[in-house]
């Protein structure tokens, strides 16, 4: 079968499975003001420096409820076995709190000790006990500081794959295993 005919047939098949939907818009009805503070802002973990430290007043003026913080390698949370470093990350968390928001912590880091090879297909730590302890210490640290962190995201785009260490390219099985270990450690530190 010529490729053009095959493509045409595939397009037709996808249309056959569709159903019609009726959408009605009522522009005369008001649902109230747009609550822009319900939308979250985000800060990538592109460096150990708080990205918008010199813009804190402007960000605070937006009155965000949440600011998503990508917790990545740059924060160097596990510089040596059983040695935890939260000082650099604390600066970014404190900046979010000063802006009047709560941090949504996106756990997207792969400490070199637990992920020695930079590879998007290496998605599970070489030592789950050490990984659990790191996550436990991280969550416990912010719980004890009274940071009010309620949301911990386990990975970001866990199936995107890229040349590099993060993001990841999980399989459904590996993500479920990683998720279970990570969430168990977080809940041990803060059952709320």
Image (cartoon, grey):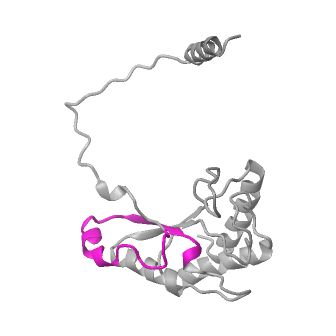
Instruction: Name which quarter of the figure residue 41 lies in.
Output: bottom left
Instruction: Name which quarter of the figure residue 63 lies in.
Output: bottom left
Residue sitting farthest toward the left: 28
Residue 190 appears left or right of 91? right
Q: Residue at x 66, y 70 (%)?
A: 110
Q: How many marks?
A: 0
Name the spot of residue 35 as percent of width and height, x first.
Answer: 29, 53
Name the spot of residue 40 as percent of width and height, x first.
Answer: 39, 59
Residue 67 shown in magenta: yes
Q: Residue at x 78, y 71 (%)?
A: 128
Residue 91 appears left or right of 140? left
Residue closer to the observer: 140 or 124: 124
Where 179 sits versus 189, above or below?
A: above
Boundaries of the magenta span: 45-74
Q: Residue at x 44, y 83 (%)?
A: 91
Where 185 sits versus 15, above or below?
A: below
Image quadrant where one finds the N terminus: top right
Name the spot of residue 104 as percent of width and height, x first.
Answer: 49, 66
Q: Residue at x 73, y 48 (%)?
A: 172
Residue 113 shown in magenta: no
Where 103 sits versus 4, above or below?
A: below
Image quadrant where one finds the C terminus: bottom right
Residue closer to the observer: 70 or 18: 70
Residue sitting farthest toward the front: 2
Name the spot of residue 137 as percent of width and height, x first.
Answer: 65, 81
């Amino acid at each position: 079968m010529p490729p053009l005919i095959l493509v045409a047939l595939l397009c037709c098949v996808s249309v056959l499975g569709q159903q019609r939907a009726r959408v009605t818009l009522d522009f005369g009805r008001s649902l109230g003001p747009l609550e822009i503070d319900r939308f979250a802002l985000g800060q990538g973990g592109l460096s150990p420096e708080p990205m918008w430290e010199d813009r804190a007043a402007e960000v605070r003026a937006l009155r965000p409820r949440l600011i998503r913080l990508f917790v990545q390698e740059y924060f160097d949370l596990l510089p040596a076995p059983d040695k935890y470093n939260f000082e650099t990350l604390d600066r970014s968390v404190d900046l979010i709190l000063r802006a009047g928001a709560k941090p949504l912590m996106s756990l997207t880091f792969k400490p070199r000790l637990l992920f020695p090879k930079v590879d998007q297909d290496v998605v599970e730590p070489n030592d789950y006990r050490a990984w659990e302890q790191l996550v436990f210490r991280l969550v416990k640290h912010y719980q004890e500081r009274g940071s009010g962190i309620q949301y911990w995201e386990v990975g970001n785009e866990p199936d995107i794959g890229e040349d590099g260490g993060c993001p990841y390219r999980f399989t459904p099985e590996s993500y479920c295993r990683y998720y279970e270990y990570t969430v168990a450690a977080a809940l041990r530190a803060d059952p709320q």
